[in-house]
Image (cartoon, rainbow, N blue to C red):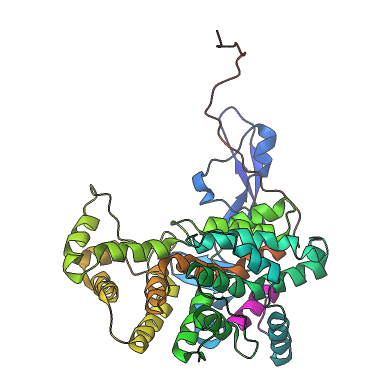
Amino acid sequence: MTVKKSILTMEGKKNIALNVRAGVLGKEAVDIRPLGAQGLCSYDLGFNNTAGCESAITYIDAANSVLLHRGFPVEQLAEKCDFTEVCYIMLHGDAPNREQYDQFVNSITRHTMIHEQISRMVSGFRRDSHPMALMCAVVGALAAFYHDVLDIHNEDHRELAALRLLSKMPTLAAMSYKFSIEQPGAYPRNSLSYTGSFLHMLFSVPAEKYEVNPVLERAMNRMLILHADHGQCPSTTAVRASGSSGANPFACIAAGLATMWGPNHGGANEACIRMLEEINTVERIPDFVRRAKDRRDSFRLLGFGNSVYHHFDPRAAVLRKTCHEVLNEMGPKDNLMQVAMELEHIAMTDPYFLEHRLYTSVDFYTAVILKAMRLPPSMFPVISAVGRTIGWIAHWKELHTQEPKIYRPCQIYTGQPRRDYASQLK
């Protein structure tokens, strides 16, 4: 971290000396904390140009479509690593050697089971509940079962809580799915990989032997890696904000889940497939594309473009290849898959899409892959959350190694000035 000096000059105010801080990569940041002593604060709607923390986990270069986790390009991690190796990198800052990797995988494997009372608790929900509703409730409730790791100032407690969350999230996700389709839940299989066991819990039934499809296992592995972290996005900010209050890790991750459920965040892939269902057939695509180009029409094509990257999402390029591998493996395309592939072709060739940089996004390909796997749209944000859990945990742990500072943004008050109360009850 390097620091330079800057002077802020304002009419009617004394000159204010401000530090300018620069990290390893990216923008310089003006340290505006001295403004408070002068009765001033910054105004940055949505905090889109405000650095609320220092972090060594993820770097995003929006202009050049770069996404790095601990310095490693995400496309390299997706191609060369399994998800657990990426989890180690995210938590510990560097790639593991064989001994470290084996020990880490063993630790995760030994914590995949959940308490049977949690299973009984899930049965109290309605069958038609959205799986994310169950996830929010059950993950928060883990604090009632694992209260032996709630001392956030204890490094060993933080490490064990991280392992438990990382290992149990696929089990809980699969349980929420099985409950919604009225099938018995499946236990994790410790002989399988992290993603293989997850697929087994999602798709196996007691009456039949389930063999993990290597194409689907590779696809799930890549999806989890590509969703592992995305900087200070809304859900990660929610986790950090909750963590800054001293809340326990399970409550903080539940806050991340609740935030990720939104259609403008982790629920974007579910919203994308709902849009494909609305279009329904290839023949109807031209009308919807015309509407998307009409600024007076409220309709928007979901799964195209990205609010972060100026050009293309580097994760989408990896997932596009994976998407076509899955479609080839799963056989003939249904109507929605035909619609999706035609929209992909339009996004790559239509001058309007190219001019406005409306490239197919990671949400688009995630939705298509999960639909091809025969999962319902309500499970799409759950799958994303399983991948993002490692990012949330890494940020939560990092938060507790830094100078403690509770999240408390300022605001510009636009309500009534001070006034005396007079009862209107006559």
Asked if residue 423 shows in the view, the reply is yes
Answer with left or right where residue 35 lies relative to residue 386.
right
Q: Is residue 165 above or below residue 404?
A: below
Residue 423, picture quadrant: top right
- Residue nearest the observer in this picture, 322 or 46: 322
Region in magenta: 83-95
Left or right: 396 with respect to 378?
Answer: right
Q: Nearer the viewer, residue 372 or 426?
A: 426
> Is 122 on the left or on the right of 349, as rendered?
right
Return the x and y of residue 265 as percentages of the image width and height: 47, 59
- Report the residue that reaches farthest toward the front: 207
Q: Residue at x 61, y 14 (%)?
A: 421
Is residue 200 within the magenta segment?
Answer: no
The picture places residue 300, in percent across and down from the top left corner, at: 30, 56
91 in magenta: yes
- Magenta portion: prevailing SS class: helix
Residue 228 in sight:
no
The front one of 263 and 294 is: 263
Residue 25 location, x and y as percent? 57, 66
* Residue at the extreme top of the image, as rendered: 426
Q: Looking at the image, which residue is at 42% across and 73% down?
A: 366
- Quarter of the image containing the N terminus? bottom right
Residue drawn at the location 55% of the way across and 74% of the way down: 174
